[in-house]
Amino acid sequence: MTELQSRGLRLVDPGAGLASRRGGAGPSDHKAVTIDGVTVMVPVHTAPAWDSPFVADAPGADGTSVLRHASIPIARIEFPKTPRFYARQTADGIPYSHIATLHGRDVLATTVLQTCIRYDSRRKTCQFCSIGQSLAAGRTIARKTPQQLAEVARAAVELDGVRHMVLTTGTPPTPDRGAAILTDSARAIKAAVDLPIQAQCEPPDDDAWFMRMREAGVDTLGMHLEAVTPEVRQRIMPGKASVPLSRYFSAFEASVKVFGRGQVSTYILAGLGDTREAILDMGQRLLDMGVYPFVVPFVPISGTPLEGHPAPAPEFMRSVLAPLGAMVAEAGLRSSDIKAGCGKCGACSSLSMFEA
């Protein structure tokens, strides 16, 4: 699975009714694939995927397909069915799928604010980001209201058995950096349905936002580093790098006191230029603070400045994930203990498999 996520997957029949995600806030250019009962997100619309040795036959009537490596059958795989809540729309005609989408098998995810103060600035934008692509393509709306999110979340639970939800956001031009939007959204969702929620934003200006989010119904928090060394952060995401690592560390410390050990996490994109040693050193520092380091392979997304950047080699990913998985287990912060969110889902990385 580590190799599959690094190299991607070619589909024999891309038009066979297989839902996948292009653009957006991520995971983008991916498709959910279930192998031996484990659902992972695999790149299918990226440049590395076009040359991947992994090929999936068109699915049969039962929704399963044969996964081949260099034309040799190696497994039967399953593509999750289109969720039933996608067939609904709001009273004003907005499809539910434009408000929130299914990630993996049982995770509902949405980007509450589909714009970002840095996205349209060449000098500030994160080079890997495609948050505006799905909006430009008409597959989502710019701002999801708390009422819309509550309505869709309730339907996703009732119709498709969704078990937890991710609320992320582009960064607005306010000092709270999106925490206020997430607080209002979580409060409305929790009033409508009992669903564990992860909120994701940059560190707000005031640590008081962590308690406000918790009291509104947020169960876990994600504040994403993406890259771990100042040099890589400045080169890859010059705008976001203006929020220094020192602020992330103070925010991690403050938020763990509110949400608990293991209920705060951060995304780290391996393959952007950080060395194995830098990622593992950061992983240990985060674990010591009670923060789950969710390391995922970088995926070069079409239409972004890094679309031609190579994906990390499977050998590099294994060299990071194997020792990191042992470190996570030693710290007692396993993904299975997270209440909600990306780390709990785990579909974008094989890290959880190395925690055993």
Image (cartoon, helix red, strand yellow):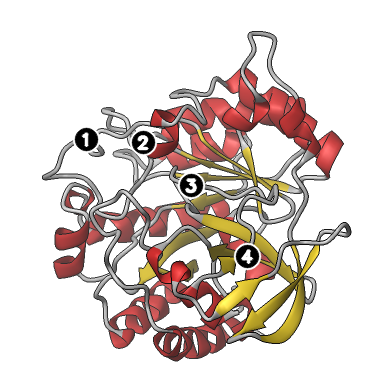
Q: Say which label, 3 or 4, has the lower sequence index.
A: 4
Q: Amino acid at mark 3?
A: Arg
Residue 132 is tagged as: 2
- The residue positioned 61% from the left and 78% from the top of the image is 332
- Whole-angstrom CA distance, mark 2 to mark 1, is 9 Å
Residue 209 in the image: state x and y as whole percent.
Answer: 43, 37
Measure the alpha-carbon separation of dots 1 and 4. Answer: 36 Å
Secondary structure beneath label 3: loop
Q: Which residue is mark 3?
A: 22
Image position of 13 with respect to 320: above or below: above
Observer-nearest residue: 331 or 74? Answer: 74
Give residue 232's position: percent from left, percent from top.
19, 68
- For marks 2 and 1 on the same chain, the one whose residue lies earlier in the sequence: 1
Q: What's the distance in space between the residues labelled 2 and 3, CA to CA?
A: 11 Å
On residue 120, the disc is 1
* Element type at mark 1: loop
Return the disc, 2 or 3, that comes first in the chain's sequence: 3
Q: Which residue is mark 4?
A: 12
**Mark in the foreground, 1 or 4:** 4
Position of residue 81 in the picture relative to residue 300 (left or right): right
* Residue located at (39% from left, 34% from top): 178
Amino acid on which the number 1 mark rests in the picture: Asp
Mark 1 is surrounded, within 10 Å at the Cα level, by few (under 14), some (14 to 19) or many (20 or more) other residues, namely: few
Which comes before the other along the chain, label 1 or label 4?
Answer: 4
Task: Say whether marks 2 and 1 touch (CB < 8 Å).
Answer: yes
Q: CA distance from mark 3 to mark 4?
A: 18 Å
Q: Secondary structure at mark 2?
A: loop
Q: Amino acid at mark 4?
A: Val
Check the image and report above or below for 196 versus 39.
above
Q: What secondary structure is found at the residue carrying circle 4?
A: loop
Nearer to us in this view, 86 or 55: 55
Residue at the right extreme, as displayed: 62
